[in-house]
């Protein structure tokens, strides 16, 4: 970490921030608004991340969105570690939008994604805790008239000798009067008391009692709920509408046109939805996207035969392919995917004079602040964002166009700001609303020498660019190559002398976006199933074959060896019942600087259906800050990736999205969840991400296991046996 | 105007009779622990107990709930419920948490009927409760843990 930005925060600023929230917010008694920055009257706020109250409560201000990945727990662990707080006295609250204090240090803007939360906060949050601790120690030393070196802090108690003891609360006011030290020495890892151990999640209690507040649960006084009629095809606009039938619905208060459709507003969701269903809208479809999946695939097929923009060139792959004695080639296909978070998209907006206040599962603060300000003619700092818990996101709530957020802002503006607006997307709005993981085709070609060693590898990717047209384009798209389209392919870890990776990024009217593990969602599959094909062609064991090509990749090797050993790779898989075929497959892949290896066992039944019985997962994510959160992210990532492997598919026909809800876009069910065993590679390196890297590994591991069981190579997702 | 018995309290609710119970609970009564996930009975996020049985509130018009005992996550106070929630907390089941009210309502209803469920019993009883974060392995473990603690 080269840059640290911890700015001092005066108590007065917190009080000011707190005052903004006194408007009526109706919440159930005891509701856990853990995620909304309440500010407070804590006497001691040494920096932007820590406040300590007279009651000894430690409030950690989390700059990252809690969307399930456990970041509130992880960030609090880092502070508690250096503060030597008692875990029970620590609470977490979401940071307001303020790029100066709360930027993601890996990005320079405020936002959550790329599995970067703990990686970019590792030093910053420990410094925040250590600074607070140093000031409490100085305050105690002055009070007791002892040398600071004689003072110990353990589990929230400051003490000296045996007799002198004080709580954080008792020292808070005195500590607040001290100068804030510039930089404080951090603990040596051998002194860690929380990092590396299990710390119970900070959001558990609220989420099992129904008290956790999501955007969907916000109700402001006089608030109206908006449900929007969206165009039936991407790129269409409302031309005219007849609101008579909608307005006749009991409870409907208003109907307004906005750029993305026509909004029906009512006091409650159900009335608004009934109004929306009764609304008649005429659409201007002049610019509408009208292709279907079949036509898109045909266009992409043509591109597969033509060279694209080069993303990697080692040696001369074409010449080596032509010269080699044995050549393999395979085409792969990946559908559009919807994020389908359990909480459909929604956003609450309240306009005031020179202010816009938003309540949202807020993932992209700096971008959203800028887009909202531009629509309303405000300054970004006049846009106040309250970050709530998100019921999932998987990337969707960090939208480069701020799409659903601006929709809510446009509605509030269209009614002249006369009432706060809660925009609610139905499940169907959410699933048909675009911003999908793009559809991709890949072609891989490789050559083996006479000894069965791969000597050439060529990989072509065809699919829409996620970054083109966004504010990130400048940094992420170079010479026609969007890094996110080829990540996981351009950095193929295997030692092969001649490698060529190239890319076509056709432009299409289907909105696309990053989706949990981004490029690796497809490159992980094609590279890891194709390397398996090469192993088979070479007559080699899949683990041994990979190992021989990974001698310069110690992290890959360690994860692969650990997964293989724990899975019992070297002993035969127990046979199935009569008529059943069983198979075991392996895959290893790096994403977001984390390496994950998985071994999957599958059983194929006599009727051709199959289940994934067990997955052994090994992960190298540097220092394991919260091992149990890491295990949970591996388990959940495997389940999420398995949904894509078994079911995930958004298709289009004449520009219409054919899926709308879970009956036609199924998610994995509890009975389909394999037994998952997670092993963490010992490491002293700084932590890397865990929210995404398990996702891309499971589909290739399962496809390789299905090959072992049936001899069928599956090169299309979702996986379907013939 | 209908009168509903929610969490042991009689509540007057002024909504159209076809309004799903889900929206009466959430928007009218402010009981937001019961979640909207699909609106078509396919995800289980809206699960509540009506006369002790787990049902989907998005598929139950308020008119069909009149005169019956409705319990939501906020009103879950039985011994079984406490033990289930303690197991959920001990195993840190939750991730985003959005589906978890529904999961817990289904788990409690299962354990009341079947104090010692097998994996297959759990899979069948919770097949209608989707979790996009795929917390399933821990849900299963937490139900077994709760069953042990209730025995
Ligand atoms: S919201 Fe009722 S089952 Fe999904
Ligand atoms: S915990 Fe996120 S949907 Fe279940």
Image (cartoon, rainbow, N blue to C red):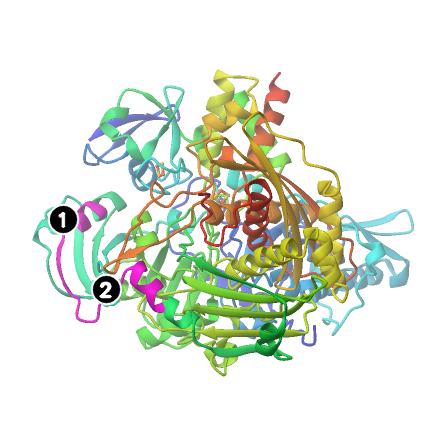
Quadrant in which residue B72 is drawn: top left
Q: Residue at x 51, y 17 (%)?
A: B114
Residue designated by label 1: A278
Q: Which residues are magenta?
A: A273-299
Q: Position of residue A256 (x, y in %)?
A: 18, 61
Q: Position of residue A711 (x, y in %)?
A: 55, 45
Q: Position of residue A663 (x, y in %)?
A: 34, 40
On residue A464, which mark appears?
none
Is the CB atom of the residue marked by disc 1 within 8 angstroms of ligand 1's nearest atom?
no
The reply to whether dot 1 and dot 2 touch (C-beta < 8 Å) is no
> Residue at the bottom extreme?
A479
Residue A424 appears in the figure: no
Q: Position of residue B19 (x, y in %)?
A: 23, 36
- Looking at the rendered structure, the number of numbered marks drawn on it comes to 2
Left or right, B95 with respect to A511, comes to right
Dot 2: within a 10 Å radius of its alpha carbon, few (fewer than 14), some, or many (20 or more) residues? some
Query: Does residue A286 belong to the magenta stretch?
Result: yes
- Closer to us: A278 or B7: A278
Residue designated by label 2: A290
- Which chain is disc 1 placed on? A
């Amino acid at each position: 970490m080269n840059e640290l930005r911890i700015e001092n925060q005066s108590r007065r600023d917190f009080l000011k921030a707190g005052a903004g929230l006194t408007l009526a917010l109706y919440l159930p008694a005891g509701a856990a608004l853990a995620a909304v920055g309440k500010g407070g009257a804590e006497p001691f706020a040494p920096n932007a991340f820590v406040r300590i109250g007279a009651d000894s409560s430690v409030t950690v201000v989390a700059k990252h969105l809690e969307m399930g990945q456990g970041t509130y727990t992880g960030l609090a662990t880092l502070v508690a570690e250096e503060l030597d707080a008692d875990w029970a006295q620590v609470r977490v609250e979401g940071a307001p939008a303020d790029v100066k204090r709360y930027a993601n240090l890996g990005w320079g803007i405020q936002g959550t994604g790329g599995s970067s939360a703990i990686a970019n906060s590792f030093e910053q949050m420990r410094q925040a805790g250590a600074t607070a601790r140093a000031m409490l120690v100085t305050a105690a030393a002055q009070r007791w008239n002892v040398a600071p070196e004689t003072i110990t802090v353990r589990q929230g108690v400051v003490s000296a000798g045996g007799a002198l003891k004080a709580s954080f609360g008792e020292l808070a006011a005195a500590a607040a009067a001290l100068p804030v030290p510039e930089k404080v020495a951090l603990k040596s890892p051998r002194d860690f008391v929380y990092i590396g151990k299990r710390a119970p999640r900070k959001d558990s209690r609220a989420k099992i009692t129904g008290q956790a507040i999501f955007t969907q649960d916000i109700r402001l006084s006089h608030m109206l709920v908006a449900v929007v009629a969206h165009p039936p095809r991407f790129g269409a606009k409302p031309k005219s509408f007849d609101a008579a039938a909608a307005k006749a619905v009991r409870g409907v208060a208003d109907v307004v046109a906005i750029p993305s459709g026509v909004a029906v507003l009512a006091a409650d969701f159900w009335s608004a939805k009934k109004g929306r269903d009764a609304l008649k809208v005429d659409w201007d479809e002049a610019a509408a996207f009208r292709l279907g999946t079949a036509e898109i695939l045909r266009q992409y097929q043509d591109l597969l035969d033509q060279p694209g923009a080069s993303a990697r060139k080692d040696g001369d792959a074409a010449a080596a392919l032509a010269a080699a004695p044995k050549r393999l080639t395979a085409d792969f296909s990946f559908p559009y995917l919807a994020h389908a978070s359990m909480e459909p998209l929604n956003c609450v907006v309240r306009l005031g004079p020179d202010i816009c206040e938003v309540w949202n599962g807020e993932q992209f603060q700096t971008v959203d602040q800028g887009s909202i300000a531009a629509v309303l003619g405000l300054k970004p700092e006049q846009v106040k964002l309250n970050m709530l818990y998100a019921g999932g996101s998987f990337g969707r709530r960090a939208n480069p166009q701020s799409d659903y957020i601006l929709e809510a802002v446009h509605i509030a503006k269209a009614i002249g700001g006369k009432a706060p607006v809660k925009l609610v997307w139905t499940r169907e709005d959410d699933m048909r609303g675009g911003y999908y993981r793009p559809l991709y085709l890949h072609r891989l070609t490789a050559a083996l020498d006479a000894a069965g060693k791969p000597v050439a590898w060529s990989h072509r990717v065809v699919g829409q660019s996620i970054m083109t047209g966004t504010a990130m384009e400048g940094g992420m798209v170079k010479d026609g190559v969007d890094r996110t389209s080829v990540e996981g392919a351009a950095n193929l870890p295997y030692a092969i002398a001649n490698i060529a990776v190239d890319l076509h990024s056709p432009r299409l009217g289907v909105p696309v976006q990053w989706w949990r593990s981004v490029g690796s969602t497809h490159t992980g599959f094609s590279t890891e199933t194709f390397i398996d094909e090469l192993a088979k062609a070479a007559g080699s064991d899949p683990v041994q074959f990979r190992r021989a090509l990974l001698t310069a990749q110690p992290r890959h090797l360690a994860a692969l060896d650990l997964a293989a050993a724990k899975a019992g790779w070297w002993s035969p898989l127990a046979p199935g019942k009569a008529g059943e075929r069983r198979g075991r497959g392996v895959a290893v892949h790096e994403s977001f600087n984390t390496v994950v290896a998985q071994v999957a066992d599958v059983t194929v039944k006599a009727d051709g259906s199959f289940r994934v019985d067990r997955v052994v997962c090994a992960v190298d994510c540097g220092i394991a800050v919260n091992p149990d959160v890491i295990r949970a992210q591996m388990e959940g990532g495997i389940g999420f990736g398995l949904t894509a492997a078994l079911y995930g598919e958004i298709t289009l026909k004449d520009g219409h999205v054919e899926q709308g809800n879970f009956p036609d876009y199924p998610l994995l069910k509890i009975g389909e969840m394999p037994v998952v065993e997670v092993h963490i590679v010992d490491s002293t390196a700084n932590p890397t991400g865990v929210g995404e890297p398990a996702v891309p590994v499971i589909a290739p591991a399962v496809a390789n296991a299905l090959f072992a069981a049936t001899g069928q190579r599956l090169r299309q997702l979702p996986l379907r046996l013939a | 105007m209908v009168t509903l018995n929610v969490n042991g309290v009689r509540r007057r609710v002024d909504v159209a009779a076809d309004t799903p119970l889900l929206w009466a609970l959430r928007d009218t009564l402010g009981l937001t622990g019961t979640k909207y996930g699909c609106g078509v009975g396919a995800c289980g996020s809206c699960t509540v107990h009506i006369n002790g049985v787990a049902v989907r509130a998005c598929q139950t018009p308020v008119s069909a709930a009149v005169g019956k005992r409705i319990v939501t996550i906020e009103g879950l106070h039985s011994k079984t419920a406490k033990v289930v929630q303690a197991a959920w907390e001990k195993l840190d089941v939750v991730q985003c948490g959005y589906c978890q009210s529904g999961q817990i309502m289904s788990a409690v209803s299962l354990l009341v009927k079947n104090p010692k469920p097998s994996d297959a019993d759990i899979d069948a009883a919770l097949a209608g409760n989707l979790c996009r974060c795929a917390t399933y392995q821990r849900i299963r473990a937490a139900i077994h843990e709760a069953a042990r603690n209730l025995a």
